[in-house]
Image (cartoon, rainbow, N blue to C red):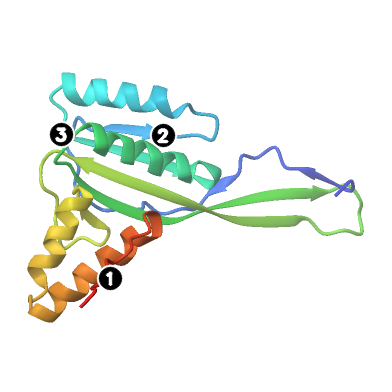
Amino acid sequence: MENYTLSLEPAIDKSEPLHSIQLDSNVIHMNVKTGSKVANLVNYAIKQFEEDSLNQITWNGTGDALNKVVACAEIMKKKIKNLYQINKIGFARTEEQWKSNLENLRDIRIVREIPRICIIISKTPLDPNESGYQISSTVKDLFNQRLQNKPRTKDTDKNAQKSIETDESIYVKKKKPKNKN
């Protein structure tokens, strides 16, 4: 690459919007970078979300910042209950032009596709038919929902009890009392 120089033209961003969801007019867009501090972002977002009359917030990030975007959204959902969420993932496509320093070399065009994510969090219900829709629930709520959807029989109750006993036996070794009859 010593025979090439990066063009002075800015990289062309050919990425399309991740979602076409209609957002409120006073929504906050939190753009997370790799060097961002999660605690600072979350504290600011929660403060704005609670003080202002905001109903929605978006968490956006690309590349190496994806894990921080997810962490921010999850921490926020843990601190503020009963939130609705839509996750959208995609790619940001950028093009760079490299000019040749030598006459016999062609110019190079580099196209990169960088993963990106947008997490929309709302106090008001969002469209449940939208792909990536998620309602904020605790593990207990999810377990109860699964039990409600599954028909209960004596066999399923026995199997559930056996699995609970097996899971506990990993941590505490139980000895069954011997009958001396």
Which is closer to the viewer, label 1 or label 2? 1
Return the residue at label 2.
31
Where is 129 relative to 82, above or below?
below
* First in residue order: circle 1 vs circle 2: 2
Q: Indicate the quadrant where residue 163 lies.
A: bottom left
Q: Nearer the viewer, residue 150 or 91?
A: 150
Return the residue at label 3.
55
* First in residue order: circle 3 vs circle 2: 2
Where is 119 relative to 40, above or below?
below
Picture coordinates of residue 129 (x, y %)? 16, 63
Q: Name the kind of residue labelled 1 in the image.
A: Lys
Tag 3 secondary structure: loop
Q: Indicate the quadrant where residue 159 lies.
A: bottom left
| Residue at 70% from the left image edge and 49% from the top image edge | 97
Horizontal relation, residue 79 to residue 35: left or right: left
Picture coordinates of residue 65 (x, y %)? 50, 41
Checking the image for residue 25, the label placed there is none
Label 1: few (<14), some or many (≥20) within 10 Å?
Answer: few
Asked if disc 3 and disc 2 are in contact, CB closer than 8 Å, the reply is no
How far, Cα to Cα, is label 1 from label 2?
Answer: 64 Å
Quadrant for the C terminus in the image: bottom left
Horizontal relation, residue 75 to residue 107: left or right: left
Picture coordinates of residue 72 (x, y %)? 37, 36
Return the residue at label 1.
178
Horizontal relation, residue 141 to residue 117: left or right: left
How far, Cα to Cα, is label 3 from label 2?
Answer: 18 Å
| Residue at 7% from the left image edge and 76% from the top image edge | 151
Q: Name the kind of residue labelled 2 in the image.
A: Asn
| Residue at 14% from the left image edge and 50% from the top image edge | 126
How far, Cα to Cα, is label 1 from label 3?
Answer: 62 Å
Q: Name the kind of residue labelled 3 in the image.
A: Asn
Label 2: few (<14), some or many (≥20) within 10 Å?
Answer: some
